[in-house]
Image: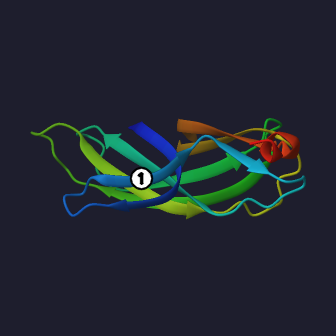
Amino acid sequence: MRVSFMICCEYANRFMNGAPALLGIFRSIQVDSFPTTLDPFYLTMELEAEPHEYGPMVFLIRLIDEDGRAYFEAEMGMDFAKRENYGPSYGYFGEVLQATRPIEKPGIYRIDLLHEGEVIGQTHIEVFKRDLDRDSND
């Protein structure tokens, strides 16, 4: 099992052919002050399962800070087709992520995807205070 991509964006959907459609991809979030509550955003990913990895599987999504404190945890399920003669099977996921507790300080926050207790993919978002002086000069 591996994660082909894991992306944060403002909106996610799928075209009729199954291809992902991602809008407003970002790696950072600017806020006015801390503590703050993050607006909901989409977490999207593509998972690749080897031929021997098929059937329903459960994953854990976790948003943590640099000190390991969790701000969001949720399980997600995905069903992979058995394709022994064809190679790997792919699954797409796109769901709204909402931090369940206020973000206390600026920093790099990590989003992990775990399967059977092991981190199989991750991405990062930086949360920082908006520079109001710089914004007013633009």
Indicate the quadrant containing the C terminus: top left, top right, bottom left or bottom right: top right
The answer to whether one can see residue 128 in this image is yes
In the rendered view, does 28 fall on the left or right side of 10? Answer: right
The answer to whether one can see residue 116 in this image is no
- Image spot of residue 79 (x, y percent): 33, 58
- Image spot of residue 85 (x, y percent): 9, 39
In the rendered view, does 137 fall on the left or right side of 73? Answer: right
Residue name at image x 43 percent, y 59 percent: 12
Mark 1 crowdedness (10 Å alpha carbons): few <14, some 14-19, many ≥20: some
Find residue 107 and report its image quarter. Answer: top right
Residue name at image x 90 percent, y 55 percent: 35
Height in image: 124 above or below 69?
Answer: above
Residue name at image x 64 percent, y 50 percent: 62
- The chosen color scheme is rainbow
Give whichever of 71, 126 is nearer the camera: 126
Find residue 55 and report its image quarter. Answer: bottom left
- Image spot of residue 133 (x, y percent): 87, 42
Height in image: 84 above or below 103?
Answer: above
Give whichever of 106, 68 is nearer the camera: 106
**Amino acid tagged 1:** Leu
- Image spot of residue 51 (x, y percent): 22, 39
In the rendered view, does 121 fall on the left or right side of 99? Answer: left
Q: Residue furthest front?
A: 137
Residue tagged 1: 22
> Label 1's element?
strand
Indicate the quadrant containing the N terminus: top left, top right, bottom left or bottom right: top left
Residue name at image x 38 percent, y 45 percent: 46
